[in-house]
Amino acid sequence: METFFKYQGLGNDFVVIDRRESGVDVDAALSRRLCDRHFGIGADGVLAILPEAGTAGRMVVHNADGSVAEMCGNGLRCVVKHLAETSGQKPQLLHVATGAGVLGCEIEWGEGGVDRVTVAMGPARLEAPILPHGGPFVRQPIEGHLGTAVSMGNPHLVLLDVPPPEAGRLGPGLEHHPWFPQRTNVEFVQPRAAGGLEVTVWERGVGLTLACGTGACAAVVASALEGRSPFEAWVPVQLPGGLLEIKVAADRSQVWLKGPVRFVFEGRA
């Protein structure tokens, strides 16, 4: 038996297991068992926190199917909330190691603890390792639609002007499309009436999710490349679980993600 913590960012929910002391990662079988919504705790993924010199810790993202993802923006905000609130201090900035590198996370405190986190997500890449031929793959035909491949440390295929309700129908096939040897997340994007974008994400190894931070980032990058969204400005992204804000540097060298994070409960499993 060990203690676990349940967190969610816009309904994208995670089991957080703090193993900084032992340094032992979670295995695939445990991840699948914990994420099972009928016989386990229920979550989109398990986030293991491991020790990493010079940082607050290393986040390892385990998907609900037991696979490991390179990066998760909503998950990182959950890990930052856990690290900050258990530190015995009130840090304004933490650096966390991820599969996409060491990322700086700015913390906004509220009356109940960490309220919002802004993550410097690193660069948006249009080249390898997204596709076997290296890319870039921008506004190119794929399965009857036009898609743009963006790496936020993990792979994304962004489909602009494809209504979000199509995600459940098209997502499974596109996730396993042969052009993406590591599979891919898929974003279904349309303009938001109040400004910004409306996005639904078919997440690799998970399926439909209420929110995806890296997916929101990839969607804004693809939209900005076409001149539909501005660079160097905060763009609101409406996901089924709520609103994120994304800003993309003009040269794509940095993408920022800002959003809320909430503690759900603590238990032992």
Image (cartoon, grey):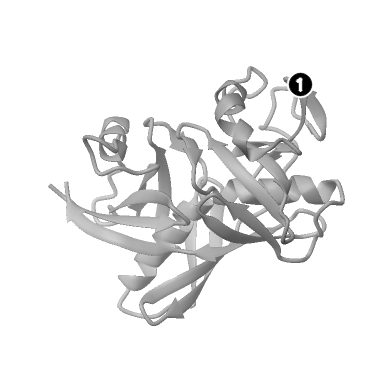
Q: How many numbered discs?
A: 1
Instruction: Name the residue located 63 percent from the left edge and 46 percent from the top edge.
Output: 199
Is 175 positioned to the left or the right of 149 in the image? left
Q: Nearer the viewer, residue 97 or 139?
A: 139
Is 141 positioned to the left or the right of 255 in the image? right
Is 37 positioned to the left or the right of 146 in the image? left
Using the rendered view, name the quadrant where residue 146 is placed.
Answer: top right
Mark 1 residue element = loop
Q: Position of residue 177 (x, y in %)?
A: 62, 20
State the residue lying farthest toward the right. Answer: 227
Q: Does the rendering let one see residue 210?
A: yes
Bin the neighbour count of mark 1 within 10 Å (Cα to Cα): few under 14, some 14-19, many 20 and up: few
Q: Position of residue 8 (x, y in %)?
A: 40, 56
Using the rendered view, name the quadrant where residue 256 is placed.
Answer: bottom right
Vertical placement of residue 256 versus 33, above or below: below
Give the labeled residue for mark 1: 144
Q: Where is residue 143 in the image (x, y as percent from the top left)?
A: 72, 20
Vertical placement of residue 88 versus 5, above or below: below
Q: Which of 116 and 39 is in front in this view?
A: 39
Q: Which of 34 and 143 is in front in this view?
A: 143
State the residue lying farthest toward the front. Answer: 193
State the residue lying farthest toward the left. Answer: 1
Query: What type is the residue that disc 1 sits on?
Result: Gly
Instruction: Name the residue located 41 percent from the left edge and 59 percent from the top edge.
Output: 78
Q: Where is residue 266 in the image (x, y as percent from the top left)?
A: 22, 59
Q: Does the rendering let one see residue 182?
A: no
Instruction: Name the residue located 62 percent from the left edge and 31 percent from the top edge.
Output: 166
Instruction: Name the residue located 59 percent from the left edge and 42 percent from the top edge.
Output: 200
